[in-house]
C-alpha cells in the first residue's frame, strides 16, 4: 500500500511541476523545484536527528 501512495504522490508532483511550467515559465519552475528539494532534504535530516 505504501508503494501505491508513493506512486500517486510522485505523479501528483509531476503534474504540479508541469502546471507551474505552464503558468510561470521554466525558470520559475526550476527554482521552485530546487527550493522544494532543499526543504525536503532539510525536513528529512531534521526528522532523522530527532529519531536518533
Image: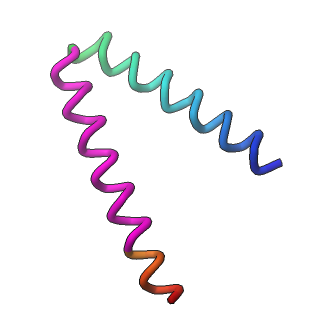
Residue closest to the eye, 32 or 38: 38
Residue 30's place in the image compared with 5, above or below, is above
The residue nearer to you, when weighing 48 against 14, is 48
Furthest toward the bottom, the residue is: 52
Rendered image coloring scheme: rainbow
User: Does the magenta portion include 28?
Assistant: yes
Measured as percent of width and height from the top left, residue 22 is found at 32, 10
The percent position of residue 48, horizontal first and vertical second, equals 47, 77
Task: Determine which quarter of the picture holds residue 34.
Answer: top left
Residue, far right: 1
Residue 50: x percent and y percent? 46, 86
Magenta portion: prevailing SS class: helix
Q: Is residue 33 rendered to the left or right of residue 49?
A: left
At 66% across and 43% down in the image, what residue appears?
6
Q: Which residues are magenta?
A: 26-45
Point 60% across, 38% down: residue:
9
Magenta stretch: includes residue 27: yes
Residue placed farthest to the left in the image? 27
Amino acid at each position: 500500500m505504501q508503494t501505491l501512495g508513493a506512486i500517486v504522490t510522485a505523479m501528483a508532483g509531476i503534474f504540479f511541476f508541469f502546471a507551474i511550467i505552464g503558468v510561470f515559465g521554466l525558470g520559475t519552475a526550476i527554482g521552485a523545484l530546487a527550493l522544494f528539494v532543499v526543504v525536503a532534504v532539510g525536513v528529512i535530516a531534521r526528522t532523522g536527528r530527532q529519531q536518533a
